[in-house]
Image (cartoon, rainbow, N blue to C red):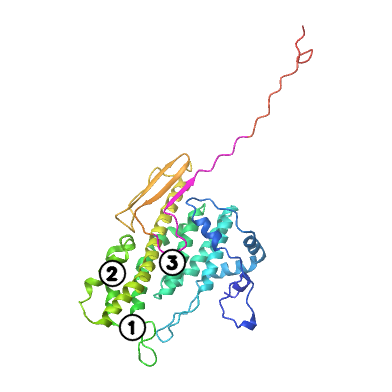
Amino acid sequence: MERSPALGIDFEPRDEEEGSPPATADVRAWLEEQLKLPDDTIGDPPADFRRLLEDRRDALDAIVGALETAPPEWKEASSEDYPAPDLRPSVRLHRVLLAAALVATRRGDPIEAERFVEASWSLAKPNEGSRRLIRQLIAIAAGRWQAGVLRKLQSVPPIWISRLSESRSWEASLAAWEHEMRPRKSDDSSLAPGSLEDETLRKGFEAVLSGLRKLGPCEGSNLDDNGVWKMVERELPMTSDEVVAQNRKILFDILLPNMKNAFNRAGRLDVDRELTLEILRLRQAKEQDSEKRWPGRMANATSTICPAFSYVYRSDDEGMEIRFDGTLVDPVMQFVLPVTFRSANPKPEPPPAEAPVLTPTPAGGMISPQ
């Protein structure tokens, strides 16, 4: 990412005397404002971001080209090197790439828009398969923006249909939590900071992970704190030990709610991606139709992610609307994608007004002779 400082995004730590790269436009507010709209409209981008895209075009092209060639190789910390690398710059780069995709879509350049989204996918790919929790959280954030931007694209990138069909953030998050909960040894053979030293806490987490895996994304996300705690209670023996009781209180008051919110984000992303997948399938069918009409119905309205729920879909001459017809508790976060999407058929251009046919003026002028 040698060219990223030109965008104000620096992946290399710097000393204060070295200075920092020029600040990039903060496009997060505009990007998320557009993705909150449950349709395919795109508003006017901020002027400073348009200038950034114009002034730093060479650097952005170089970054996109590098990401199209291969995903980045982030260092995966081992148990002896536990602190994770700082990947916050990659989050900012995701926002720039995906906001640029919206700008390209808005000006009618679908090929460039797809390149920006593809670059974001490449940037996120190493995190998708990581067992590090922090990297899974970054992958979830990037995946949510990607799913929202793909809904706005006017052409269908076929590769995304298979990608969205295979992506499972819920399962990846379960695996990351299982990895994080395992005891880790430091150089002095003691348990490393942040590990769970008490067997009670470990059993509690194991019970939650096992229970959530059985429930799946929707049922698991809809559990309240008491529902999660009941999973723990069933697996723990009764005790009068004050230390054990205090550990259980910590588990309930602090650790479990944070864990639950992380899983809620993962489960919601799986639903968001599935809705995006259905939109892409419908758009693909529309493109293949000789009259460019939206399909009259969905091939399969039942949700694969949440089999107890389905999608409601309708289409007519005005356009189409699709909605996830299930119950979901929004994660505790600033931004969630809508579970409804509408796309209007483009209004036909009005035919040019025909020139009036002039009748020759009769002899004597417009006034009839007496």
Q: Characterize the local packing of mark 1: few (<14), some (14-19) or many (20 or more) Cα atoms within 10 angstroms.
A: some
**In the rendered picture of this protein, how many numbered marks are placed on residues?**
3
Residue at 28% from the left image edge and 75% from the top image edge: 204
Q: Amino acid at mark 1?
A: Pro
**Which residue is identified by label 1?**
183
CA distance for labels 3 and 1: 25 Å
Q: Tell me which amino acid carries mark 3.
A: Ile
- How far apart are labels 2 and 1 at the CA level? 22 Å
Image quadrant containing the C terminus: top right
Q: For the residue marked with disc 2, what is the amino acid?
A: Trp
Q: CA distance from mark 2 to mark 3?
A: 25 Å
State yes or no: discs 2 and 3 in contact (Cβ < 8 Å): no
The answer to which of 235 and 169 lies nearer the viewer is: 235
From the top left corner, tell me how far across and down residue 192 is, in percent.
38, 86
Alpha-carbon neighbours of circle 2 within 10 Å: few (<14), some, or many (≥20)? many
Which is more N-terminal, label 1 or label 3?
Answer: 3
- State the extent of the magenta-drawn residues as a range: 330-351
Question: Image point 58% across, 69% down: which residue?
Answer: 63
Residue tagged by mark 2? 229
Q: Does 294 sit left or right of 23 as displayed?
A: left
Extreme left residue here? 238
Q: Is residue 245 above or below residue 167?
A: below
